[in-house]
Image: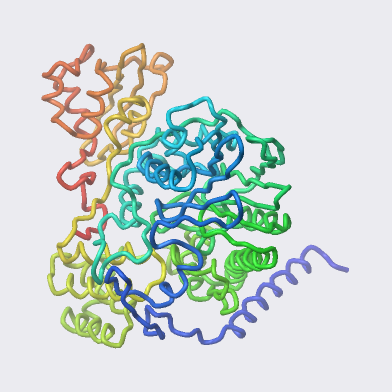
Amino acid sequence: MLTRKNASLLLIAALAASSANLQAQEPDLPLTPYMGGPVELVEASNGAIANKRILDGIGQVAWLEPTIEQPVDGVWVFGGFGLAPIAIIDTDEGLIAFDTGDTKHDGELLLEAIRTISDKPVKAIIYGHSHTVFGAGVLAEGSEDIPIIGHPNLNSVVAANMKAAGAPAYFQELGPYLTARALIQFNAFMPKEGPDAWVVPTTLPENFDMAFIPVNTPVEDGQEMSVLGQKMQFFTKYGSDDKVHTTVWLPDRNILFTTLLWSSPPQLYSVRGDVFRDPREWIEGLKFNRNLEPEVLISAVARPVVGKAEIRKRLEGYLDGASFVLDQSLRGILGGKGPDDLRDLVRLPDYLKEVPNNLENYGEVSSYPPAIYYQAVGWYDNDAAHLAPVPPVEAAKRIVPLMGGRDKVLAAATAALEKKEYSWAAQLVNYLYRLDPSDQDVRKLKAEALRQMAYVSTGANNRAHLLSQALALEGKVKLPRVVPPPAETIAVFPTTFVDYFRIRIDPAKSGETDSVLRFDFPNDTSAGLHVRRAVAEFIEDPAAYPRKPDIVLELSPETWAKVYLSAEPIEDLIKGDGLEVTTGEATEAARVLNLFDRYDPARAVVVPTTLVQDHQ
């Protein structure tokens, strides 16, 4: 008889066997290029030293320069004009645009390119996802009466992003931090030419002006519609890097417009930091795309693919790559592997690497399994020795003497570098860097280790972070720790940024403070903060709060932006015309506001900077 106790014992035995099988089957993994594995370096056209694998494969799936392609009659794809391509469908009534660029400037470049193939006006726009909607006003040439088709939730997502403190984040308060990391990811601190230049041009435009037109024709999953005489079916169920994607199917022509096939494996984690991207949703969407059996596939993130057999092969190889990463990550977890183990355990097999769209030219697969682990299990890797670890600096203080001191660690790191064990060299020298970030020998060696890792990397994201930090260590660039939100955004949403302000309370300064502040903005808009020693509670509706304010500040949204951004001393703002203390004492108001960390405009970081590792 199978009792509950026996069933539990069988389950435990099965899991133990799974772990043992994983250990037994796990071969000695070949070395990665980061640790002396085979790699051939070549020089790109812009002088960048790069892994030959990228230059050999990138042309099949992405664009290295602006290109116009016509995969089928009446459809053009414009790639390389911005971060993502767009497509144009020609009809007797005008042009249909599938996506519009990431900025107004993208829209201007794209419209100029469109005019080389057609003089017809853009009479309808379809948003494939929320990132490439900001050139719409340019493509529409000022007309907002045309159909703007998209996911029913796209407008709210764009509005939320516009209201955010920076790049999208699980906690929007961290937007400034993730924005700084996004600028690094998108090559903002790398030269355009020379050995340290970018290879894959994932560069942000200098002008971030937007020309967004809201969706005025929302579509539901499976909805059919005629757009400028073209029969279309829309699917909104599946997403990838956001949740408001729209897939477009032209059933009469077997043409699929999708946002799910990228030029690189599904990026299940972005090293800049982002909300979790569920592999299951992406995989199911790819299966759905495959099962439509398209004859022409137009991707919003890669070059078009033509031919039913080739499309099926690409989609199936691509979804198998994503399935492999997910399933082997979960298998590894069942086998007792932690997030760091999974980086090396989960590697695409050669047959999946041969799928053109599985070229790791954007993100690298090694960064995805740890993200899956943290989402599924959390940070604890089931090694009890890690429950109360020694802080990194304290560990370095103890490890360096055990290794024989600074000079021997430096010599060991140098030897590792000479053996092309770049990751090991970086890890060794990092112990010294933690102890003294100003040590020039240490900075030089760490920079060179990161540089060599960048040269052998395939992913544009990895290369950007590695080289940017190398250049910063050498004093050639200055990387911001955070990028504050624009004053204009704060002024439009002042109460939202009163809420975000709360996380900057400094417990060392606030002491015994117990004070309620109310911020009164024009048009009877108010918000508050209750500073209770080490915590500042946001008060959305001060009128409903059970305690009356001790300090009332009457100010314009523009003045609040100056307070938030530390543009001027609080005392000067109170003495000026923009900020009036109508209840309480001005000196006490200044004291309480000065309990919050201030932005340092010179470094674009939040003080105190000792809370984060410095790469300057």
Q: Position of residue 445 (x, y in %)?
A: 20, 75
Q: Quadrant of the N terminus?
A: bottom right
- Which residue is drawn at the image coordinates 69% and 35% (left, top)? 225
Q: Position of residue 526 (x, y in %)?
A: 35, 17
Colouring mode (rainbow / by chain / secondary structure / one colour):
rainbow
Q: Position of residue 347 (x, y in %)?
A: 53, 74
In the rendered image, the vertical position of residue 490 relative to residue 292, given as above or below:
above
The answer to which quarter of the image holds residue 289 is: bottom right
The answer to which quarter of the image holds residue 192 is: bottom left
Q: Position of residue 89 (x, y in %)?
A: 57, 45
Q: Quadrant of the C terminus?
A: bottom left
State left or right for residue 607 relative to residue 5.
left
Residue closest to the eye, 509 or 102: 102
Residue closest to the eye, 250 or 70: 70
State left or right for residue 26 relative to residue 501.
right
- Which residue is drawn at the image coordinates 45% and 55% (left, top)? 79
Residue closest to the eye, 412 or 207: 207
- Which residue is drawn at the image coordinates 63% and 68% (left, top)? 317
- Which residue is drawn at the image coordinates 34% and 47% (left, top)? 179
The answer to which quarter of the image holds residue 41 is: bottom left
In the rendered image, the vertical position of residue 343 relative to residue 224, given as above or below:
below
In the rendered image, the vertical position of residue 150 relative to residue 520, given as above or below:
below
- Disc tally is 0
